[in-house]
Image (cartoon, helix red, strand yellow):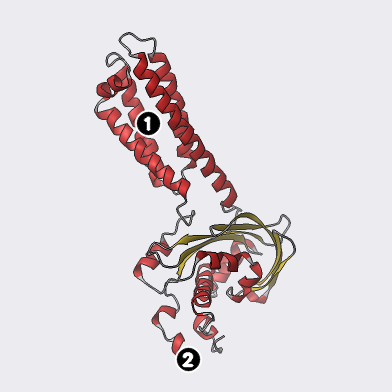
Amino acid sequence: MATHETQRSDLRPGAGVTAGTHADRHRERWLPARGRVSDVQRLAGGLGWFSLGLGVASLAAPRLLARAIGAPDRGATPTVLRAVGVREIACGIGLLSRPRPAGWTWARVAGDVMDLALLTSALGARRSRPGRIMTAAAAVAGVTALDAVTARKLSRQDGATAMPAPGHAVVVRKVVTINAPREALYRFWRDFTNLPRVMHRLESVETIGEKRSRWRARGPGGTVVQWEAEVTDDRANELIAWRSLPGSRLSHTGVVRFTPAPTGRGTELAVEMAYTPPGGAFAARMARLVGQAPEQELQEDLRRLKQLMEAGDIVMSEGVLYGAARPAR
């Protein structure tokens, strides 16, 4: 039976993690750093479309917009509104083109403050309508509060799960769709002692506290590397982030996200890890030359996890994975 399973086309070396479908390979190739679309990111996208719409209106009909908010439709007002339109379009494009647009959201906050100042100055202008201006100012104040909350959440999210940037870090990202509830996947991953069951190079993980653990792995050439890590962010059934403690021989961080699959069946699991191997960039290049590329190894690790969670066992042989004739587990 194990021999039969190893001949399945979706288990061949180099196949996509998610059963080799074109859509899954496309998602794996273009998996962004964020790994999943959170509610705050959807809100940022909505603000992006709002910025584009307001920007186009300001450029196309500045006089009509001026009358709508109670400002004079003559003099410098149309020119100012066109400048506001350019700013809004730039912010909209930035919000929609970035996976975590915290900077562009803060730019919207700054623009909102400018808009409030302009509306306040328009109160004393001739032919202005104070009632409409005050209504517009109240609306802008509400949007400002929404922008500020969104920017703060995006900034906090980036700070909690961002990958480190040491000089020679190796960064790998992979995604796999597993036909299992994300609650089960979260429980499995949160118990780090389970990970050696699916991660080929990880020999053991020992829990030494509520958020701390000791890791032991095999490096290139059979070397053994140990380090201690701590959980930096833990959101039940959504996200787990960790990093190695200062002074560890291997600098390592990781984040795994659990998202309901777009098809409505199963869970999309996205993993992003960054580490500095002993020996730095040279060691990383040598590992790739001898066929130990971290991207390929993570892909195979996630493939084993998929089999374990869906079938209850790992039926791929080590020979299929690493080119050696070894019996299936």
Question: In this view of the protein, which residue sits in the foreground, 216 or 193?
Answer: 193
Label 2, on which residue?
A: 1
Mark toward the start of the polypeptide (2 vs 1) = 2
Quarter holding the C terminus is bottom right
275 over 57 or under it: above or below: below
- The amino acid beneath tag 1 is Arg
**Residue 220 in view:** no
Pair 2/1: label in front: 2
> Which residue occupies 49% across, 76% down?
310
Mark 1, other Cα within 10 Å: few <14 / some 14–19 / many ≥20: some
Residue at 42 percent across and 86 percent down: it is 7
Residue 98 lies left or right of residue 251; in this view the side is left
Q: Which residue is mark 1?
A: 87
Contact, mark 2 vs mark 1 (Cβ under 8 Å):
no
In the image, residue 321 lies at what x, y percent?
51, 80
Give the alpha-carbon distance from disc 2 to disc 1, as whole Å: 63 Å
Residue 45, percent from left and from top: 40, 44
In the rendered structure, the answer to whether residue 74 lies left or right of residue 258 reads left
Element type at mark 1:
helix
- SS class of the residue under badge 2? loop
Whole-percent x and y of residue 63?
A: 26, 21
- Give residue 265's position: percent from left, percent from top: 41, 67
Q: Amino acid at mark 2?
A: Met
Which image quarter: residue 84? top left
- Left or right: where does residue 7 sit relative to residue 244? left
In percent of the image, x 51 and y 44: which residue is there?
154
Q: How many marks?
A: 2
Determine which of the numbered discs, if any, sits on residue 289 in the image: none
Badge 2, how many Cα within 10 Å: few under 14, some, many 20+?
few
Q: Is residue 213 visible?
A: yes
